[in-house]
Amino acid sequence: MNFWNKLKDWFKEEEQSSPTKPFVKEWLERTPEEKVDLLKWKLEDTCLDFCSLVYDSFSQSEKHPYLTFLKSPYSSGFLLDFRKGNYQLRDAQRFMDFLKEKVEHLNYLRQLSDFRLYTRNGKTERIERFYLKPRVKIAENNQVDQLFGNVIIELTIQEKQPLTLKFQVNPYSDRNYTKSQTFEKMIDQIFM
């Protein structure tokens, strides 16, 4: 197959792509510059603003136009809608990285970091994702301590503009695992 046919096939794949069938799926690794930028970002007012937004909205049960909390027996979390505010991609990515670090400090390991590219309505979208699981620790009753459950942090970007950031915690209901700690406790430990 010649170069032009390969190129045409690639564009066809891009046009037929979706979040579940991306035309690019690769490992997500932040550059050394982005890691240094995260250290600076954590000292900026924007970091404090994001933390206050989530913590205050959660603890005071106040409705916020950019933030929705998710709560069901099987999953808890929040969804931050960047389309309703004036947020930059850098801030969205740094907040995502900040959340990942905070979860890792709760005795979690990153199991997956990837990004997917696909086309939606003629625009390129990118989903960056971290999937974290608790480190294996056996409790007194021979059950695995699941801490809060598995954690997914997912940032959706369209044409280099952040759309949404989802933070989702999924506890196991299997008898081989301890009862999960509450989402409220996790929020306290991340944002206090």
Image: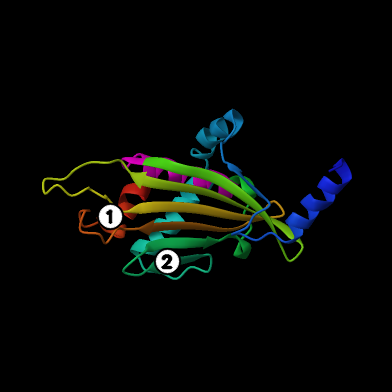
**Magenta stretch holds residue 92:** yes
Residue 185 bears which disc, if any?
Answer: 1
Q: Position of residue 151 (x, y in %)?
A: 40, 52
Mark yes or no: residue 192 visible: no
Q: Which residues are magenta?
A: 91-108
- Please tell me how crowded label 2 is: few (under 14), some (14-19), or many (20+) other residues with Cα within 10 Å: some
Tell me the SS state at disc 1: helix
- Please tell me which residue lies in front, 45 or 58: 58
Side of 185 where 31 appears, left or right: right
Could you tell me how many numbered marks the image carries? 2
Question: Which residue: 50% across, 33% down?
Answer: 39
In the rendered image, the vertical position of residue 27 relative to residue 185, given as above or below: above
Tell me the SS state at disc 2: strand
- Please tell me how crowded label 1 is: few (under 14), some (14-19), or many (20+) other residues with Cα within 10 Å: few
Identify the amino acid type marked 1: Lys
- Please tell me which residue lies in front, 133 or 7: 7
Residue 69 bears which disc, if any?
Answer: 2
